Amino acid sequence: MSFTRADYEKAAAVIRNRTDLPVKVGLVLGSGLNVLADVLEERVEIPYKDIPGFPQSTVEGHAGELVLGRLEGMPVITQKGRAHLYEGYSAQQITFPIRVMQMLGVNTLILTNAAGGLNTNFRVGDVMLIVDHINFVGMGGNNPLMGPNDPSLGVRFVGLAQTYDRHLRAQAVKVAAENNINLQQGVYVCLSGPQFESPAEIRMLRTIGGDAVGMSTVHEVLVGRHAGMRVLAFSGITNECIDQIDTELETNHEEVLDASRILVPKLETILRGVLRSLQ
Ligand code: HPA
């Protein structure tokens, strides 16, 4: 099934009925990072189930509501919890909230995720500024931009050379330095999951230039760029990737959620600083 502008407008109308906050910034919060939505002021919370077309997240660590409010005075709309392809949703479904943000006038999209550290210099608890990506899922033909293109939403062929906005990235780097946060930078690899990677896959992803690996974000980034939004994205490194067979180690969702707790204050500081720079 493919959505049309009318579906996005319908969902946006439900949100406008609840608040007239003039949101320009959209924020997507990844695994374990949802608590960042709780620091918004003048919050209006709208459960996904109240919004027609919104996918429900079925994963622990992912809430399911939109939170609109102010952060550093800036009106923002926050996706508290996201849906993933591995839950059985289509790429269009999981990016539906980004289209609704487009209808509401969002022009800046900031995304976060939990990711495994491929780069051996990264440590659990590091934040990585995403500078580029490798989209295995999209390359394999599962992509929210496939299907009929509505030119009122964006162009048919989106260029990706300027995907992660250089000005926003520079701001993030500056804010991190000012706050003594060791901000890593690198390439995010998007896989479908839900299984974690095999050791051979980890070694391959390193070889092709990946620094962090996860199961989200890039689909939303594509829709955001199609919609003409400026995009900024961060990976929270929640675990080291296991690159050898027959060790006692195994990646698991609990360690991902545990590490998020270290990541939240760092991400909050960076987000606040970037939002301040936007005013
Ligand atoms: N691999 C894929 N996705 C992830 C990981 C990982 O190691 N950690 C958190 N999300």
Image: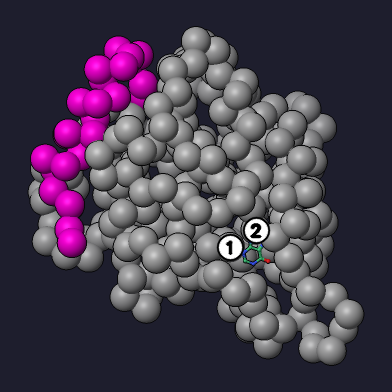
Q: Which residue is mark 2?
A: 115
Give the extent of the magenta segment: 1-26
Q: In terms of image quarters, where does ligand 1 lie?
A: bottom right
Examine the rendering and report whether any part of residue 136 can be seen: yes
* In magenta stretch: residue 11: yes
Labelled pair 2, 1 in contact (Cβ < 8 Å) = yes
Q: Residues within 10 Å of mark 1 (few under 14, many from 20)?
A: many
Left or right of 152, for residue 184? right
Q: Horizontal and vertical percent for residue 159?
A: 30, 58
Residue 52's quadrant in the figure? top left
Q: Amino acid at mark 1?
A: Gly
Q: Which residue is at a point 87% across and 83% down the rendered structure image?
A: 247
Q: Amino acid at mark 2?
A: Ala
Check the image and report above or below for 114 versus 141: above
What is the total number of numbered labels drawn onto the structure image? 2
Within 8 Å: ligand 1 and the Cβ of disc 1?
yes
Q: Which residue is mark 1?
A: 214
Within 8 Å: ligand 1 and the Cβ of disc 2?
yes
Examine the rendering and report whether any part of residue 274 can be seen: no
Check the image and report above or below for 240 versus 207: above
Q: Which residue is at a point 30% across and 12% down the rendered structure image?
A: 20
Most extreme residue toward the right is 248
Q: CA distance from mark 2 to mark 1?
A: 5 Å
